Image (spheres, grey):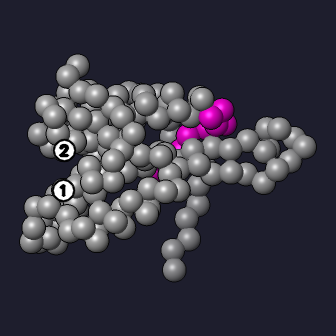
Amino acid sequence: MGHVVTLGDPVDVAALRWRWAQEDGPDCHSSEIPPPEFVSHVASWMGSRTVWTARYQEHAAGMVCLTTHERMPSPNTRAAASWGYLGHLYVRPSARGLGIGEALVQTVFAEAERRRYAKLVLSPSELSTPLYRRCGFTDAHSMMVWRP
């Protein structure tokens, strides 16, 4: 195994997000380390969601976020159930293929069960789809999107 999943620290989460953004657009940041104001912004963002990080060889190697969607109260308990959104799953390229992504997803599953969510949803990327399928996610074609 060699990795440990814990609740995320804003410094680690900011560093992982910074690295992820560099992967998506290498020209977007001149420094390898996020500035303090970015770390502060990430810390504030983390206040309304749960984020875990995976450490491997003493470094933050991956992260995942779980956001709760609370449905309107209803006398029908099924209609009132809350659900979770799994997002921001990222594993550094050097740590991919070590089971870190799956360990992060399993951590979210355990928390979703503890919170008694009716379901978990996500928006996979092409790269992440095989992992999510291995973890038991299936296609659900019932979502619509509006973009301004």
Nearest the camera: 85 or 65? 65
- Residue at image mark 2: 92
In 3D space, how far apart are the residues under numbered discs 1 and 2 (Cα atoms)?
8 Å
Q: Chief secondary structure of the magenta span?
A: loop
Callout 2: few (<14), some (14-19), or many (20+) C-alpha neighbours within 10 Å? some
Q: Is residue 107 magenta?
A: no
Foreground residue, 83 or 137?
Answer: 83
Q: Is residue 145 visible?
A: yes
Find out whether the residues at labels 1 and 2 contact each other: C-beta distance under 8 Å.
yes
Instruction: Tell me the element at label 1.
Output: helix
* Residue 123 lies in the magenta-colored region: yes
Magenta region: which residues? 115-125
Residue at 24% in and 67% down? 36
Per the rendering, the mark at residue 19 is 1
Is 101 drawn above or below residue 147 in the view shown?
A: above
Does residue 29 appear left or right of residue 126 in this picture? Answer: left
Density class for disc 1 (Cα within 10 Å; few <14, some 14-19, many ≥20) is many
Up-down relation of residue 50 to residue 17 (above or below): above
